[in-house]
Amino acid sequence: MKNYKTSIFTGMRPTSGITIGNLIGAIKPTLDVLEKESSKRPMLFVADLHSLTTNEGKDTQGNVISVLKDYIAAGLDPEKADLFVQSQIADEISKMTIYLSRLVTVSELLRIPTLKEKIRSGQSEMTVNGLLALYPVMMASDILLQGSEYVPVGKDQYPHMEITCEIVRKFNKKYGDTLLEPKPLDQGEPVNILSLTGDGSKMSKTNPNGAIILSDDIDVSLKKVKRAKTAFAGEMNDDLDSLLQIAKYVSTEEEGREFDRLIEEHMEGKQVMGDFKNLLMSSLERFLKDFQSKKAEISDDYVLELVKKGGEKARSNAREVLEEVEKAMGMRFV
Ligand code: AMP
Ligand code: TRP
């Protein structure tokens, strides 16, 4: 493959309650790139095959549609992007995952943080399902089949991105230059929005007490902000930094300046965390109302129509890449 096919590529698993962390980690960087370079056409997908690893999606179909609407409600212009669902190209993904698995050792798979986390939380290497171990290889397939140049993701996904690059290097060394490594997106520090409970974990809907879930009742989210851990006057810590990132994301320009001023005063030792939270709650309330009403206006039929088109493009990209991969590996005889 000589050129990238997709300039910006990212995806999410189909969970019913995506959090503001998802938006800031994956969608905001996508929209930031588009703001600078509007000619780029991003591709976003819903990773429904990935939800098989955790059995999370009892209502996978409904959740898939919900995440597609989330992309649009978060500000993605559906006319200027391609949207698709992973299972639309399940055949291509499955083949690519088999080919790429050849290049990864079992011990490398067992070292992956997402798997280690499962093992820490009660499962053993003996009981964890095989697909969970292959998860990063399937993610590499998603990325490489679309010929992706930039892949905006949150910090938790960085180890998976490294594996993708490692797989490309091994593949090209073994079979000749075929695949292109995705490039790191210049978004400064990796994004890791923390749980509002202050326990140091990432914000995730699996720990709902500390998560701003976009579809939740807005008052529930505001109460979580009210209880959120901040920092002592004069100090900055990761909890306050996360709150500030959320504040910047949901605020208007004028509110943004007000947040800067409050943080300055806080660093000078003044007691302003009450004011900071009040402003955050009012900005967040407006943001969530707006997000929820935009989402409510999008019909199921509209998104299904979009993924029909997007799926065709994804399939065509995937088949082109697979053909090159199979030729390089000697797996295509006619
Ligand atoms: P997931 O919901 O796990 O499929 O995540 C989808 C995307 O959101 C990935 O790029 C994650 O890295 C990103 N993401 C999820 N939670 C957070 C968080 N708390 N902070 C930053 N990025 C996140
Ligand atoms: N693994 C990602 C997550 O859990 C979702 C995902 C699957 C993804 N394949 C991808 C993200 C390809 C970006 C590109 O968050």
Image (tube, helix red, strand yellow):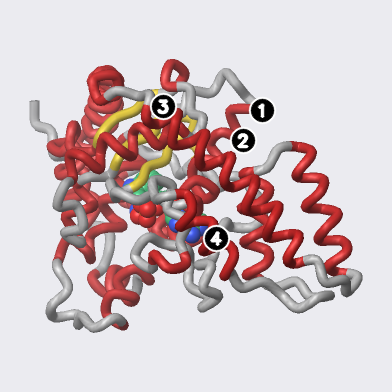
* Mark nearer the N terminus (3 vs 2): 3
**Circle on res. 32:** 2
Q: Residue at x 30, y 36 (%)?
A: 145
Disc 2, SS = helix
Quarter that holds the N terminus: top left
Quarter that holds the C terminus: top left
Where is residue 333 shown, x and y percent of the image? 9, 31
For the residues bearing labels 2 and 1, Cβ distance under 8 angstroms: yes
Mark 2: amino acid: Asp
Mark 3: amino acid: Lys
* Mark nearer the N terminus (1 vs 4): 1
Determine the CA span between mark 2 and mark 1: 7 Å
Q: Nearer the viewer, residue 327 or 298?
A: 298
* Mark nearer the N terminus (4 vs 2): 2
For the residues bearing labels 1 and 4, Cβ distance under 8 angstroms: no
Q: Does 155 sit left or right of 55 as displayed?
A: right
Q: Does 85 sit left or right of 131 as displayed?
A: right
* Mark 2 closeness class: few <14, some 14–19, many ≥20 residues within 10 Å: few
Label 3: which residue?
5
Q: Nearer the viewer, residue 109 or 123?
A: 123
Specify whether tag 2 is near ligand 1 (CB below 8 Å): no
* Mark 1 closeness class: few <14, some 14–19, many ≥20 residues within 10 Å: few
Q: Total label count?
A: 4
Label 1: which residue?
36
Q: Nearer the viewer, mark 1 or mark 4?
A: 4
Q: Does 49 sit left or right of 151 as displayed?
A: left
Choose top left, top right, bottom left or bottom right for residue 283: top right
Is residue 303 visible to the viewer in this orientation of the structure? yes
Label 4: which residue?
193
